[in-house]
Image: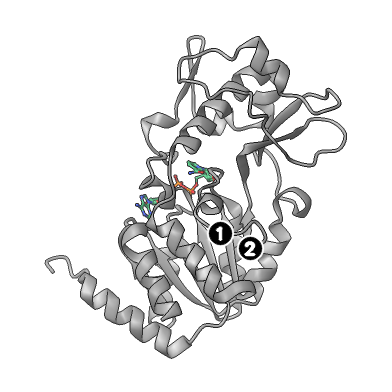
């Protein structure tokens, strides 16, 4: 090829060679917004991410914060109920489904760490036990004060169109059974990971014991994929990055390719995840 990028058939052959060399038993897969982009859920990069309140335009990094929630809780809820509607209207794609097949084959030797809040891995067939949703899930809420166990958003709360207001009826439903106000079950940009709500320690423990780390569709902007990769690579795991664009994980993969333990599958999740799973389970 003109720019010296390997062809798809060359990448397939390199994938065969890496798997034959490393024969991974335990696999950790980290996914980001890119794996759901082909299901029609926008990543945070596009114009769909913006949100207007009054005359002001907000970025996701402004809306998805405890600071925003504490000053305009109804607007933040409105944004999340809109996003929940977008997620609920989307369907899992072949990449989500392939990862469910991988879980079926590997059982407890498989761990999925997803930054996505769309629930598509669960709807695609992965189990809650093997899926660590490190940033939460738009289908859940939890009390602002007291017991903060996540609970499903009541079915009576309607999806909201982009320019629709949040009705008083819906607002009144966003409470716990004993009447406490709730918030979306989402890790916000100004908050910290923790084991109880987001199983972040479990994600790192899985990384500690894996022989293969697969990263799909993440730009590497959030902290936990970074730490998961650091732990896995420290323990000499192989790394495969699936992403059409370069990112910190593709850089690691290219670097470790020199010792036969890295591969950047430059392309989409739907192109490469099913093939990788077929080869791991074949
Ligand atoms: P990001 O938006 O920062 O980056 C998306 C990455 O996906 C990019 O590296 C891009 O090159 C890649 N990509 C685009 N299309 C792809 C495809 N078809 N196949 C594979 N890769 C593809 O996403 P991020 O790293 O996940 O970080 C964004 C944060 O926003 C996360 O914390 C996440 O919780 C949240 N978020 C979640 C969703 C969701 O749940 N679906 C959507 C938007 C944002």
Q: What residue would you read off at disc 2? A: 130
**x 45%, y 26%: residue:** 50
**x 52%, y 83%: residue:** 24
Please, is residue 140 above or below residue 112 in the view?
above
Find numbered disc 2 in the image and state the secondary structure of the residue it sits on.
Answer: loop
The answer to the question of whether label 2 and label 1 lie on touching residues, with beta carbons closer than 8 A, is: yes
Q: Is residue 9 left or right of residue 166?
A: left
Quarter of the rendering containing residue 254: bottom left
Please, is residue 100 above or below residue 88 in the view?
below
User: How far from the left and from the top, in percent, is residue 73?
Assistant: 67, 20
Instruction: Quarter of the image for the C terminus: give it.
Output: bottom left
Q: Is residue 196 left or right of residue 160?
A: right
User: How far from the left and from the top, in percent, is residue 2?
Assistant: 11, 66
So how many labels did they put on this image? Answer: 2
**x 66%, y 63%: residue:** 203
Label drawn at residue 222 = none
Quarter of the rendering containing residue 217: bottom left
- Between 169 and 268, the one lying in front of the other is 169
Find numbered disc 1 in the image and state the secondary structure of the residue it sits on.
Answer: loop
User: How far from the left and from the top, in percent, is residue 3?
Assistant: 16, 65
Instruction: Quarter of the image for the N terminus: give it.
Output: bottom left
Q: What residue would you read off at disc 1? A: 126
């Amino acid at each position: 090829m003109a720019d010296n990028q390997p062809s798809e058939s060359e990448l397939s052959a390199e994938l065969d060679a890496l798997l034959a060399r490393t024969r991974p038993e335990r696999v950790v897969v980290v996914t980001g917004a890119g794996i759901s982009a082909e299901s029609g859920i926008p990543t945070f990069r596009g114009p769909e991410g913006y949100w207007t309140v009054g005359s002001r335009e907000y970025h996701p990094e402004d809306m998805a914060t405890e600071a925003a929630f504490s000053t305009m809780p109804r607007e933040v809820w409105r944004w999340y109920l809109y996003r929940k509607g977008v997620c609920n209207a989307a369907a899992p794609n072949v990449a989500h489904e392939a990862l469910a097949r991988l879980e079926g084959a590997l059982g407890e030797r498989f761990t999925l760490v997803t930054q996505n809040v769309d629930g598509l891995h669960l709807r695609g067939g992965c189990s809650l036990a093997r899926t660590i949703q490190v940033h939460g899930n738009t289908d859940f809420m939890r009390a602002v004060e007291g017991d903060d166990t996540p609970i499903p958003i009541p079915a009576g709360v309607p999806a909201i169109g982009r320019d629709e207001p949040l009705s008083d009826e819906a607002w009144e439903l966003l409470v716990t059974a004993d009447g406490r106000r709730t918030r979306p079950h989402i890790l916000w940009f100004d908050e910290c990971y923790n084991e109880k709500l987001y199983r972040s320690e479990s994600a790192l423990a899985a990384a500690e014991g894996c022989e293969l780390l697969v990263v799909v569709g993440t730009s590497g902007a959030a902290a936990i994929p970074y730490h998961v990769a650091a732990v896995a690579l420290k323990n000499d795991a192989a790394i495969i990055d699936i992403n059409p664009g370069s990112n910190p994980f593709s850089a690691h993969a290219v670097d470790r390719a020199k010792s036969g333990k890295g591969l950047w599958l430059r392309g989409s999740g739907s192109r490469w995840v099913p093939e990788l799973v077929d080869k791991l389970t074949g």
